[in-house]
Image: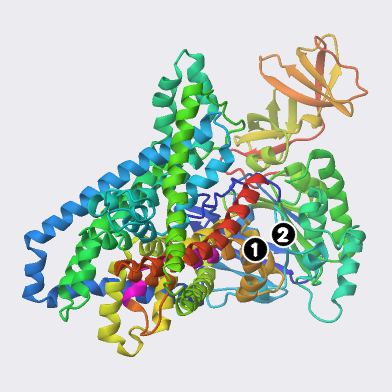
Amino acid sequence: MTTPIISVSDASVSFDDTRALDGFSLDVPVGALVALVGPSGCGKTTALRAIAGFQDLDAGTVSIRGETMVSDKINVPPEKRRVGMVFQEYALFPHISVAENVGYGVRGSDRVRRVAEVLDLVGLAEYGSRFPNELSGGEQQRVALARALAPEPDVVLLDEPFSNLDAPQRERMRRELKHIIRAARVTAVLVTHDQSEALAIADIVAVMRSGRIAQVGAPPDVYRSPVDPWVAGFLGDAVMFDSTVVEGVIETPIGDLDSDVPSGTDVQVMVRPEWIRPVQSPTASACVTDTEFYGHDQRAEITLADGSVIEAMVPSIDAIKVGDTVTLTLLDAVVFDRKEPAGLA
Amino acid sequence: MTQARSAVEFDPVVPHGDNGIVRSRGRQAKAPWWLWLGALALVGPLLLAIGSLFLRVFDATPAAWDTLFSTRTLGLVWRSFALTATVTATACVLGVGGAWVLARTDIGFRRGWGVLIALPLVIPSYVLAMVIISATGATGLIADLTGYTFPSISGFVGSWIALSLSTYPYVYLITSAALTRVDPTLEDAARGLGATRTRVFRTVVLPQLRPAIGAGALLAALYTLSDFGAVSLMRFDTFTRAIYAQYSGRIDRSPAILLSIVLILLAAVIITAEWRTRGRGSIFTSSPSRSASRVRLSRAGRSLWTAGLAALVAVGTVVPIAVLGGWVLQGLANDVEFVIPWNAVVGSITGATLAAIVAMAFTIPTVVLIVRHQSKRTEVLEKSIFALFSLPHITIAIAVVAFTVTWLRPVYQSLGVLVAVYAAMFLAQSVSSAKSSLMAIDPTVDDASRSLGRGRFQTLWRVQLPLMRTGLLAGGALVFVTTLKELPVTLLLSPPGFSTLAVRTWAAADELLYTRAATAALILVAMSVIPVYFLSIRRRESVGS
């Protein structure tokens, strides 16, 4: 692997008595679209602002393109970092036109051409003479993106880029953003609190928790193989069972799993609802007690023989209704050691 | 970009520091040194001058201490207190009454009355005082024109009338603003529970207005305690007049300094009290969705209130302007040479324009510091700026005289120092105005500029400055108007040969040359009206949008 274009290591920041960043480390490979995702207050925006240079670090280093930006001795100001930034509320300059906004960071004689080029890229070629307050939320968003891309940075940072858009706009903008970023050939880091958004848009998802990275990986990998129950629960719905390994077998209320974990280990088994396949069977002891039909799939609430309740996501072509008795098949499962949750597969 | 932001109140008369949103996004970046340099270069020396006044206590002469501890000082305290208390009470009655009747009843011609009863703001207290003195008594204008001798009004009664008329508009404006923010649904709720109108006013409206009225009252009190022009013309001995008497024509300045220190301490008590009410006043900063239903006045009530408003406008504005005009006409009729005091006009315009420009220039770094780099230290800076605005001008003048005579002899009574003192004293007005503008702007636009490769200074120049431009210009206009009316500092710090319309009005009135005084006063009022008119238009527009 080549050297990462952004590298943050052991970054720490404290506000009064809370630690916003606490040993945060992240390497971003060239050309990747990375989603930094975590619950609100986990420090993800602080991390982004530290990379951009708006947040001083108490400790740690930041380097971009192999050049040190922040260390004990160095602190390169934001205007010298050549990093584009798209702000959550867009932060367009209200007193100048769209074209002037976009051209603000471009120097040299090429300015007019470059402004036209980026506006065209974001699909707003005709909007140059308008003012920010005359634009819709989605248009402002695209201007903000164009403005960040105009000086031809090789890195763009986006802070909650979709949070001010309504649901249908959000989905369209998500696809568009991906295309624009690809077309501009930049490395992008975006911050979001929405895990489904992160999984949908990114090449690499970095899950953040309490000021540090909990897990980094491709979307399917972090979803299928979370490192701990917390990450598992954060990235999607999870059904959890406590159990103990007995001679290579883990018993769960919905079936047994083979395992190479040593006997006697206390484990926690995590199953995604869509990994559970209920099949109608008159003699079975599990019973469907509620359903919700979504169209593309359906949710079934299943009460087990021992009285516990689990959820399964079932393809919509499966006929399933309240009162059915079902046997359950496990398509996949993740096993965590209850003593040291990270590490088991 | 379009999320709801609480509208930041723009208040042209009463600047204040703590009006609103504190946006904290973790720790803010450290302010660069040149912002602090810019913010402190103007007010720093003045604060130093006032601070060093207190050191003068140690080299005060025995004679000065004798003056301070004489029974005369007790009299000063008593008279200042009596005047302040009566004026404040009167201002509250007039101001709250006017605000309530215009905001909550169906009295006719409300908008017009609203403008008219705030007009005394453009008439300085010494002009009102001169009008009262020159119109009444055996040799007054009334006696002269009608033959009827109106009883002479001066001393305590004269000061009380002049200052009550000068101060009630402050109470009126603050209370009206508060009334529009009191949620009328509370009043409806009380009425729905069976309360009568008077009970609603007493138990629901008044308690919510109390912080606003308190703030207005303290402002009126501070104004009265600080006033020099009116009491000196009325020959009513309060602290300010005694300080001036001790200063002028004496070689030993320490009695004036000791008295100034006492007055500063008295003012500090009121200023602190005023700051306390500010915080509490912010309880009702909601903007009600619905305007209040108006009380329907009875026929008698309507006539009575209309008569009251008319009387207030007559006494506060119409009569003073008429009397000034009368003196000019009388002078023309009696072949008194009518001269436009060009020297004073030029002096006023020069002083006020330079003060406005200097104040605006220093407002820029100050506001950026206060709004974008908020910290304990910037709070102290802001409080100091507002304290300078609130201190009695005569004490500031004494402090600057003592300071420059001792340490900066070459600039003593120079135009540069005069303008700098004006600008520093009134900086609070332009800071308050520009601050509202900058606070309405999301601080991430600064970050956006930085991330696009522009440094702090370029960001200040290309983003922050254009965004606060309107507020800054409005603030400059306020400084201009306030400087035009300024008297004690101008009297004590003017370079030889420099005169202003304020000084000319006051000095001529003091020598009973009323035609001269009236000419200067009329020009002065006319010059103040223009910027105030533009400010009120701007205010209405910003409220309307």
Q: Chain of mark 2?
A: A
Quote the CA–CA distance across marks 1 and 2.
8 Å
| Mark 2 closeness class: few <14, some 14–19, many ≥20 residues within 10 Å | some
Q: Left or right of B405: which side holds A326?
A: right
Helix or strand or loop: what does disc 2 sit on?
loop
Q: Left or right of A218: which side holds A55?
A: left
- The answer, for residue B18, to whether it is visible in the render is no
Residue at point 42% right, 35% down?
B97
Helix or strand or loop: what does disc 1 sit on?
helix
Q: Chain of mark 1?
A: B
Near-viewer residue (B255 or B264): B255
Residue topped by disc 1: B467
Main SS class of the magenta portion in the image: helix
Near-viewer residue (B460 or B157): B157
Relative to B333, say whether B203 is above or below. Answer: above
Q: Left or right of B216: which side holds B443?
A: right
Residue at point 36% right, 68% down?
B487
The percent coordinates of residue B375 (x first, y second) are 45, 61
Q: Left or right of A117: which side holds B396?
A: left
Q: Amino acid at mark 1?
A: Leu
Residue B482 inside the magenta-drawn segment: yes
Give the number of marks: 2
The percent coordinates of residue B315 (x first, y second) are 41, 47
Residue topped by disc 2: A94
Q: Amino acid at mark 2?
A: Pro
Magenta residues?
Answer: B476-492
